Amino acid sequence: MQGNRAPRPEQQNHGPTKPNSQDYQKKGGITNSNGQHADSSEHPNTNSALTLDLQSFRKPGEKTYTQRSRMFVGNLPTGVTEQEVEKLFSKYGKPSEIFINKDRGFGFIRLETRTLAEIAKAELDDTPFRGRQLRVRFATHGAALTVKNLPQFVSNELLEEAFSIFGQIERAIVIVDDRGRPTGKGIVEYTAKPAARKALDRCSDGAFLLTAFPRPVTVEPMDQYDEDEGLPEKLINKNQHFHKEREQPPRFAQPGTFEFEYAMRWKALMEMEKQQNEQVERNIKEAQQKLEAEMEAARHEHQVMLMRQDLLRRQEELRRMEELHNQELQKRKQMELRQEEERRRREEELRMHTEEMLRRQQEGFKGNFPENREQEMRMHMVGQAMGLNRNPMAGNPVSAAAGNMPAEASPLMQGGGSSAMPGGGQGGFPRGPPGPADFGPNKRRRF
């Protein structure tokens, strides 16, 4: 490890050194009037007295205990325990992961948020711990991917939604320039390496599209750089090549010298590389524009073909609907014809039945005609006889009682067994039209 190869500060500088502001903030030390540091035994008391409001370092909606808040702790003393490291970082919240390699003197710890991890790195890096200077860095994110060729209208949310099909995502960012314009690149960080590997393999084998624009994205493992700390002098391996390179200080090459000649040749080579890269970029841009034009033409042709197919499909559906409609009309016509035939048949049967009934009635009327004629003649003769027995001029009222009736009319009024009544019914025949004697005083009209 580079942390193990770095010399301790007391071995490099034997003279007194002046603490700068960073060291003052990191170590929390104070100086006395002689310019010497106070006893380091006071540091734990000072750190223990300081407290942090952990809620104030959490952004709204920020995910906790992610890979971005995982830290590497190097140059640990031999035999250090997890409890001691946890106590060292207790000021910055409760960690979710602690791993210590006691033999090689390094470990990993995961804090709650990225902000707390940055504060812990700023305060604990290069601080003494049990006779050694700690080296605190952010751990390498092994599940981070770089996404290239992003369309113009892809946002952070869309990028996260698109790549979440491969696994749980911690962070998805579209990289923009200083004016907020998208650069066509993005970063996707997963919680685990298998999800990142799956996304990398699927996007490499297939064409993953994020929008309607048919240009697939390119996914690569993210190259991680340390742009904050860089390479300090104390971490350089000072071997033979180091001392040889450092023989000459920084300078400008003088014309006419060996250095100037080869320096100019190096500049010409770098200029040629720059021009070739620019030419390659121009060729790629022209090829992209040509491909976009061809794609637009092909898209238009494809849309026309789809519209033609849709028109043919609609015509086919219309033809089928017309056939079904014609079949339905034919069925209705056939049904109406059958109903009409059924109605005519019923009317014909009803007419024949009516004619048969009339014919039977006529035949029965002709067979009973003599008997009916004889009954009518008898009734007419009886009516005439009753009219002769009445004397309208005599003035004798006829009594309502049965005993005052004329003797000639008594046989007719008694209906018992008389053959004058058709069918042997009881009662007499009607007397005929009423006379004046029937409407006298105290007389009832008889029918």
Image: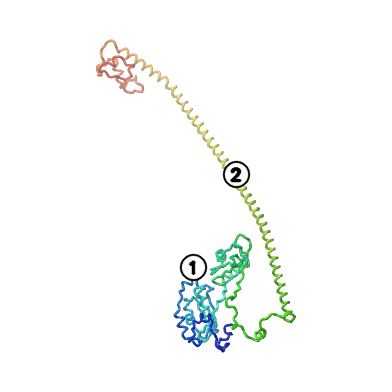
Q: How far apart are marks 1 and 2 (CA)?
A: 63 Å
Residue marked by disc 1: 60
In the displayed structure, would residue 174 be above or below residue 320? below
Residue 126: x percent and y percent? 54, 82
Residue in view at x 59 percent, y 81 percent? 232
Residue 151: x percent and y percent? 61, 63
Chain-order first, disc 1 or disc 2:
1
Answer yes or no: is residue 165 visible.
Answer: no
Q: In which quarter of the image is the C terminus?
A: top left
Q: What stretch is highlighted in magenta?
A: 321-325
Instruction: Please name the predominant secondary structure of the magenta segment in the image.
Output: helix
Give the camera-side residue of 367 and 303.
303
- Queried whether the magenta region covers residue 183, the answer comes back as no
Give the camera-side residue of 78 and 115.
115
Residue 366 disc label:
none
Residue marked by disc 2: 322
